[in-house]
């Protein structure tokens, strides 16, 4: 039968292709929140923005509100939260609660008991709506409630004040009768959802749609009441028109461009200082950088004094030439732009001139007294009330440095380290370090050189506080490494002895940083030092000075210095070398606590990490763990293996493999070729597998059973002599 064709006035009408079903996109809106404050300390802004973003993400997720993107921006006068693609409605939720068992909930006639009635009332549902469900424990009652999603505005009205109240700062203040604490007084709030005001309230400030521009530059276009905001896009446009660059990333780029341009005009380069750059970013709302100068005769001062004076007192950037020499110029990032910027430049130059004059005075006066003459004055300075004077601290460091130098070098190294330790803390009594504490050590090295001390001594004093951070520069000289280790080991042992041990996030004496520095120096410099012996020497030095030990805690025993340092080994291995946790644990757990060489242990970790990638490694560990469990369960003491008691060929093959492997393994271990030693162990996989496939360890004959356990004990001992392989996690287990 011929098909029918639909006709139109103009001819045949083609069939339209089927349209795909339309997907209804969820309705979305946006959220703008601005917290306007008095000028915040620059150090507070970036952490507050991170906390604001994390808090907002948690808030929205907990409130079942989907969103597209969350951004935070901020200046010294405002913290801003921007949320785009925000759902207009909460997602609905089904909540279930398990109640009493069916046997308890209903009587013999099937009527609900007081237990069922009380459960239903507590859940806000009728008794007849309760459901009986089967569980592994039996039949139990469940209350099922359908919770319909609220409008986003209703949710935010409740949640945003809580978000603001949870923001915390290193230092906070009360400024009105509400008792609310914040870093600085809050002066205005903007809260808009989809362009409509959310009239939330925080510290008596009611949110509206009025923001404020730059305190000075924005005065020409901003009324006393502020300017109105309609949306995120409108806010970003208007805030810049009112002379505020609210995006910190954009301010950073502007500052970097301005610094580079002005440095080029002065035929120099900006001294790289990321910390100072961050300070500049969060101290201004609209950056304008100026180039200033100071009198060239100040260049006779040590470079560090000039740069520190410019940075710490004024927040200025230093300029250097192609060879790294300091230029008599500085760069200052200001929050102002005048028609005549010369006024600002001259004002900054006058202030800096006074600072440099003070620094020169301190430097000249300090050099009139040698470091050696300052040592006796340390008796009057308290290092810590429980650890004695600075002089006592110095005496302990001298003894510690001599001990470490004795392990690592010759008599000349011992002599240099002792002298450097004697003078190491003397610069703390100088005027320049009193003015600029960050120059401690640096100025000690400078003054030691001025006093005619040997180059090795002055270098060690200069380097004693290195590394200052996880990624910081380490000491270059061996004497500097020894002095840094001695000082840090004494501090850790001392504070542990008096019971001032880091706990959780509390570490007031930076002992974790000290321990990480010890780990870095030893491992990265490949110093072969018996760390356990060094810790004992530090503890003996404290005992000789009669430093009173804190009472032992009721649980856990005395604080473990070596265990504390091992924790930092784990931190360093994971963060700097991406080592597996179980690999590090296997090596550290097998370490001899009486003789610890961190360099050797780390070599083992790296070799073991490499071999874990081999396909046969996981099956090998499965076989080893089976042997280990059997001997460990039996608490089997190693006994000679008797070949006459073998009943299977696989027993003899494994025994022969262990004996033949031992020689090659021992030679590789003695030479520190840990990769080769592990290769020997990996080659044992086949005989171990064959043994377990062919042999029943728990034989009826006690002599045969004992002989098989002894054979497995030889395997276990061989593996455990490298590391505790029972700590290794096998994929899928």
Image: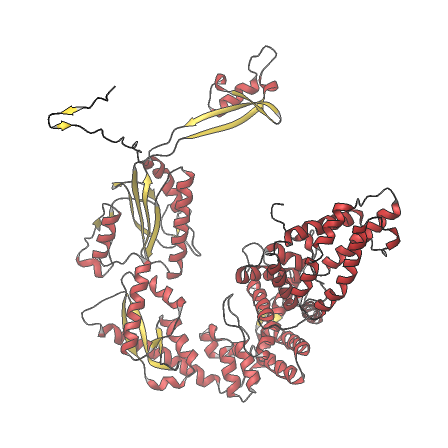
Q: How many marks?
A: 0
Residue 391 lies in what quarter of the image? bottom right
Horizontally, residue 254 falls left or right of residue 648, namely left
Against 500, is 482 above or below?
A: below
192 left or right, relative to 608: left
Q: How is this picture coloured?
A: secondary structure
Viewer-nearest residue: 659 or 94: 659
Q: Quadrant of the N terminus?
A: top left
Residue 696 in the image, given as x and y percentages of width and height: 79, 44
- Quadrant of the snapshot with the C terminus: top right
Of residues 676 and 425, the one drawn nearer to the viewer in this rendering: 676
| Residue 636 appears in view | no
Residue placed furthest toward the bottom: 452
Q: Is residue 11 above or below residue 691?
A: above
x, y percent for residue 285:
28, 60
Residue at image position (55%, 62%) is: 577
Q: Which residue: 80% across, 56% down?
A: 655
Query: Where does residue 260 sit, x and y in percent of width and height?
Result: 30, 72
Residue at the extreme top = 109
- State the image quarter where residue 435 is shown: bottom left
Near-viewer residue (598 or 420): 598
Q: Quadrant of residue 699?
A: top right
Question: Which residue is rendered at x = 34% and y = 50% of the image?
Answer: 71
Q: Is residue 169 visible?
A: yes
Q: Position of residue 245 (x, y in %)?
A: 27, 58
Residue at the extreme left of the image, as rendered:
9
């Amino acid at each position: 039968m011929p098909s029918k064709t639909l006709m139109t006035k103009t001819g045949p009408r083609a069939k339209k292709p089927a349209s795909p079903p339309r997907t209804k996109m969820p309705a979305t809106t946006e959220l703008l929140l601005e917290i306007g404050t008095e000028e915040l300390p620059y150090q507070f802004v970036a952490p507050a923005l991170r906390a604001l973003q994390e808090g907002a993400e948690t808030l929205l997720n907990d409130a079942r509100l989907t969103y597209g993107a969350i951004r935070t921006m901020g200046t010294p006068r405002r913290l801003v939260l921007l949320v785009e693609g925000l759902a207009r409605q909460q997602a609905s939720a089904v909540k279930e609660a398990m109640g009493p068992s069916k046997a308890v909930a209903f009587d013999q006639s099937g009527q609900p008991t007081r237990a069922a009635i009380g459960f239903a009332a507590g859940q806000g549902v009728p008794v007849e709506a309760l459901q009986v469900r089967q569980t592994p424990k039996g039949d139990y009652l469940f209350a099922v409630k359908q919770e319909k999603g609220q409008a986003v505005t209703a949710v935010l009205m409740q949640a945003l004040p809580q978000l603001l109240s949870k923001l915390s700062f290193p230092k906070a203040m009360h400024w009105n009768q509400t008792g609310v604490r914040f870093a600085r007084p809050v002066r205005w709030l903007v809260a808009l959802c989809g362009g409509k005001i959310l009239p939330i309230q925080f510290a008596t400030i009611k949110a509206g749609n009025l923001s404020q521009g730059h305190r000075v530059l924005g005065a020409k276009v901003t009324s006393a009441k502020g300017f109105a905001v309609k949306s995120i896009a409108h806010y970003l446009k208007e805030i810049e028109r009112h002379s505020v660059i609210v995006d910190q990333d954009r301010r950073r780029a502007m500052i970097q461009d301005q610094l580079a341009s002005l440095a080029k005009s002065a035929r120099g380069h900006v001294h790289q200082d990321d910390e100072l750059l961050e300070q500049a970013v969060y101290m201004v709302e609209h950056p304008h950088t100026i180039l200033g100068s100071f009198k060239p005769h100040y260049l006779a001062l040590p470079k560090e004094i000039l740069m520190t004076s410019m940075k710490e007192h004024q927040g200025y950037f230093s300029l250097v030439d192609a060879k790294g020499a300091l230029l008599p110029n500085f760069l200052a990032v200001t929050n102002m732009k005048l028609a005549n910027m010369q006024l600002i430049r001259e004002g900054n130059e006058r202030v800096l001139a006074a600072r440099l004059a003070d620094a020169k005075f301190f430097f000249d006066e300090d050099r009139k007294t040698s470091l050696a003459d300052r040592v006796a004055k340390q008796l009057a300075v308290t290092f810590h009330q429980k650890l004695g004077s600075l002089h006592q601290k110095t005496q302990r460091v001298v003894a510690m440095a001599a001990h470490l130098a004795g392990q690592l070098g010759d008599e000349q190294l011992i002599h240099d380290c002792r002298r450097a330790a004697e003078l190491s803390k003397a610069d703390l009594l100088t005027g320049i370090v009193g003015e600029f504490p960050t120059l401690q050590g640096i100025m000690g090295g400078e003054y030691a050189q001025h006093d005619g001390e040997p180059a090795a001594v002055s270098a060690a004093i200069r380097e004693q506080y290195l590394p200052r951070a996880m990624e910081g520069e380490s000491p270059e000289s061996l004497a500097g490494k020894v002095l840094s280790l001695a000082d840090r080991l004494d501090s850790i042992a001392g504070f542990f002895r008096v019971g001032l041990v880091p706990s959780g996030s509390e570490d007031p004496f930076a002992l974790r940083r000290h321990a990480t520095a010890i780990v870095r120096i030893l491992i990265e410099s490949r110093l072969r030092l018996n760390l356990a012996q060094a810790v004992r020497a530090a503890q003996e030095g404290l005992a000789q000075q009669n430093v009173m030990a804190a009472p032992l805690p009721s649980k856990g025993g005395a604080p473990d210095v070596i265990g504390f340092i091992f924790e930092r080994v784990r931190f360093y291995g994971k963060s700097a070398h991406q080592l597996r946790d179980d690999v590090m644990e296997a090596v550290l757990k097998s370490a001899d606590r009486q003789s610890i060489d961190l360099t050797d242990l780390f070599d083992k970790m790296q070799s073991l990490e490499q071999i874990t990638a081999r396909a046969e490694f996981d099956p090998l560990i499965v076989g080893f763990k089976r042997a280990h469990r059997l001997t460990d369960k039996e608490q089997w003491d190693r006994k000679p293996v008797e070949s006459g008691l073998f009943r299977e060929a696989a027993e003899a093959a494994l025994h022969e493999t262990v004996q033949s492997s031992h020689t090659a393994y021992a030679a590789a271990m003695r030479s520190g070729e840990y990769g080769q030693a592990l290769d020997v162990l990996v080659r044992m996989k086949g005989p171990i597998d064959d043994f377990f496939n062919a042999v029943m360890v728990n034989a009826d004959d006690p002599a045969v059973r004992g002989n098989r356990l002894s054979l497995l004990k030889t395997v276990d001992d061989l593996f455990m002599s490298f590391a505790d392989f029972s700590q290794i996690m096998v994929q899928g287990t």
